[in-house]
Structure formats: structure tokens, C-alpha cells
Image (cartoon, rainbow, N blue to C red):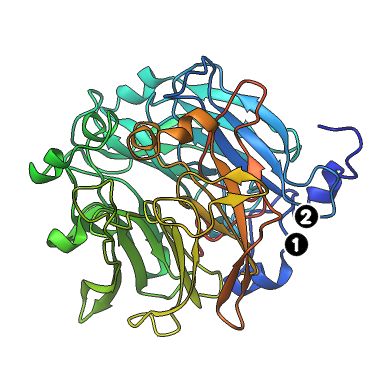
Amino acid sequence: MSSDSHHTTESHAHGHHAGAVGYDTPQAAIEQSARERLAYVPALYVGTDIDAPDMLTVVDVDPDSSTYCEIVDRIEMPTKGDELHHFGWNACSSSCHVEGAERRYLVVPGNRSSRIHVVDTEDREHPELVKVIEPEAVFEHDLSAPHTVHCIPEGKIMISMLGNDDGELPGGFLLLNEDFEIDGRWDKPGDIEMNYDFWYQPRRNVMVSSEWAAPSTYQPGFDLEDVEAGKYGQRLHVWNWDEKTVEQTIDLGEEGLVPLEVRFLHTPESEHAYVGAALSSNMFHLSKEDDEWRATKVIDVEPRDHEDWDMPVPGLITDLLVSMDDRYLFFANWLHGEVRMYDVSDPSNPRLTDTISVGGLFGDVREVKDREIIAGPQMLQLSLDGERLYFTTSLYSSWDDQFFPEEGERGSVMLKADVNPREGTMTLDEEFLVDFGTLPEGPARAHEIRWPDGDCTSDVWM
């Protein structure tokens, strides 16, 4: 890190002490949190010409810092070819009642390698890799391709796994204990075939998981024939959280092809969630009525014609999130180059309040700070107070190479929009740009964003 930065580790240590796992309630997260000053963001070399391992970067997002918008530290993984993807904390607000629990360790899986890394963030600005679980230990449980990481009560960590030990179906769920040792499977083999994301709502004794495809299907890249052959998912699985059993499976049909991210409202008593169907580019509202869960399409992103495509281009809804106050839904249309903001005060009737058009195939903004924006917004993260929305532009290495090949050649970027939650508006901050194309090793792809003190896409309340 540059010596002229005014930061100290202590300045980032808001709430970072024994027992500091999060906040008692979502409202407390809004009221008590300090402004985000650091972000943890994976930077990937998989699928590029750079012969280097992936890394976890520390990004300075403090506007009062001399290193604002710079990558101030990098933690290299020990092995090449991981494809770091989604990652999460060892503890979150669901463990507020657990004595001695601490949000301190990041669990950072390699989706392509099935290797799982543990990073100690006690020194917020200079985290340290402290453990690696090798793929062979994962394969012993007939699982592979780790994806979503959620801390769950009793100090355990649960990871959705997208394939078996051969990279085929079925997937399942892997558990780690508080010492980051594999604690077996959470589910029974064969409970589900396809897997992807999940969110649990313990006060309602429910978990919902979604579907992508087998690693052998999605890792080489996207093939429309695989969709026609039924190799991509279109179902949601509703689990009994305590019993660890599937109670209901909802088939979304052709309007729900490739349902990816699952986001419940943050209110612990809520029985409302949203799921984005990427390929169909539809948003579904999930709710419980008369003891049965129902998924209703509430937003339809219309495809658009493009001169270089022989078919209308879907928006490709990738990431989505709900603001901590449960007022707004944000989601990204990666191919279109768009972020949308909806008022979901009435969860079953989202109301579009604003859009940002940047990058992708149709984005109005093509440059920020003289840097060309190639791919569209992809992974999103919102400040806890709901006033700043950050996003990166890489989806998955092989998919990037198909749809936005320059992304791998030039590296991706991290951008920011200023949000006015009172008015329901977003404004692209054209002075904010983190360029992952300027790393010393060469251009890298940036993916998910995590804050040291919790965020809108990982914290669950008991």
C-alpha cells in the first residue's frame, strides 16, 4: 500500500472485535454502520493470456483517501486456474447471538478448481491467506464447483456445490465447521439435480435454492443447444430448513430459464423473495400463500435487436439485490448494459423508478474517466445506507470471451452510482473507476464485491 495514504487499520475496524458479526436488525445495519472504506473483490486470470493465479484484491473506496479508487493490496492464490467467483464470510448477522463469533474470515472458493481458500481479514487493509482446502477433500463428498457461501448459525459455513466429483450432476451443499474443516454434506445426495444460489430465512424455516447447470455444461461456455436439450435449469427448490429436505419444487417454465440469484427481503419475518431468470430475463416474486410457495413473474425485460445478432438480445439478468430497508430492488442486465432500480414497497408489484445505461451492447455511457466500458454491469453491491451502488463487469471467463472478448484482453472495471433512496433515482459517478486492466501482472477480471462489515447480499437475521 502507498505510504502516503492517511488510512490506518484502526480506521477500518468499525465494529471489528470479538463478537462483532453484524447488527441486531437490518435497521441497525442502516443506522449504525459506517460508510464503506474498503471493498474485497476477486481479480481473475483464468481464461486470459496472463499466466498467473487469481487473487483477492483490496480496493480503496474512501473518497477522502489518497489512494481512492486504487487497489491497495492483493492476495495471490497459491495455484493457477481457480476461477474465483462468489465468496462469503465465516459469520454474519445470523450469528449475533453466538458468543465469541467474529466476522473475520472470508471463504473464497474456486468454481473451476473446487479449491476453497480461507482469508483472515483481521488486518483489514492487508488480509492474509491462512488455509486452503484442496479439491480432493471436496471430491470425497461427491461434490465440486463451489458457488454461494453463506455463514449459518452454530459457527458453520454452507456452500452450494454445482456438480458431483466428475463435474456432472447432481450438485448439493457442503458444510465447513468453525475450524474450516469439511463437516460433510448438508443435504442428502440426489435431493436435487441442479444447483446454484440459495438464501435461508430461519424464522420461516425455509431455504430456497436455484439452478444453473452442471459444471461440464457451463464451464466451457454457453451453447444454445444445451438449453434446448434441457441442460440448463428452470426450477426453484423450497427446503425445510430444520429438516434439510425439499418440500416443494417450482418449475418456472420457459419464462424462467436459468434462475440464478435468490434474494429474500431482509426483514427476518418476511416471506417475500426475488429470483432473476437470466436467460428469459424475467424477475420472479416468490411468496407463500395458503402454506404453498408461489413464483409469479413481476418484471419482463424485453429483448432488443442488434445488428450483430441473428436473434433478439436478452437482457441477461445476472445479479440482483434488495436494499437493507427492503424498499428497493436493483438488478443488472449484463448484455444490454443496464442497471434497473425498482420500488418494492409492495413486493408483488415492483415499480420501476430509474435505470443506468452503461457498457454492454446498448449502454449509452461508453467511457468513464477516458476508459472504455466494454461489458455491462454484472455483480452488484449496495452500501448499507442504500446511497451508493457499486458494480463490476465480468460474468464468467468463458462467457466473457464469447460475448465481450475484449473484457479478458483489457480487464474489467468497478463502477459506482450514487443513489437517492428518497427520490428513487441513480446517477452514475463518472469520477469513480477502478481499472482492473492496470494490475502489474496484466489485465484481470473483477467479480463479486464484499464489505468488511456486512452487505446486502450476505447478511441473514435469525
Q: Are marks 2 and 1 in contact (CB under 8 Å)?
A: yes
Query: Residue placed farthest to the left in the image?
Result: 229
Q: Can you give x and y, in whole percent of width and height, for residue 372 in the image? A: 56, 44
Relative to 113, residue 233 above or below: below
Relative to 440, residue 257 above or below: below
- Tell me which residue sits at (49%, 60%) in the image: 364
Q: Give the crowd class for mark 2: few <14, some 14-19, many >=20 residues within 10 Å.
A: some
Q: Can you give x and y, in whole percent of width and height, for residue 402 in the image? A: 32, 35
- Tell me which residue sits at (65%, 69%) in the image: 385
Image quarter hosting the N terminus? top right
- Name the foreground residue: 236 vs 67: 67
Q: Quadrant of residue 149?
A: top left
Element assignment for label 1? loop
Element assignment for label 2? loop
Check disc 2 and give the amino acid type. Answer: His
Relative to 322, residue 277 above or below: above
Q: Quadrant of residue 170?
A: top left
Single out the mark in the foreground, 2 or 1. 1
Tell me the residue that label 2 is attached to. 14
Mark carried by residue 373: none
- Name the foreground residue: 49 vs 275: 49
- Tell me which residue sits at (34%, 37%) in the image: 399
Q: Give the crowd class for mark 1: few <14, some 14-19, many >=20 residues within 10 Å.
A: some
Query: In the visual, does 462 lie left or right of 25?
Result: left
Query: In the visual, does 274 lie left or right of 57?
Result: left
Of label 2 and label 1, which has the lower sequence position? 2
Mark carried by residue 34: 1
Check disc 1 and give the amino acid type. Answer: Ala
Task: Say if residue 135 shows up in the picture.
Answer: yes
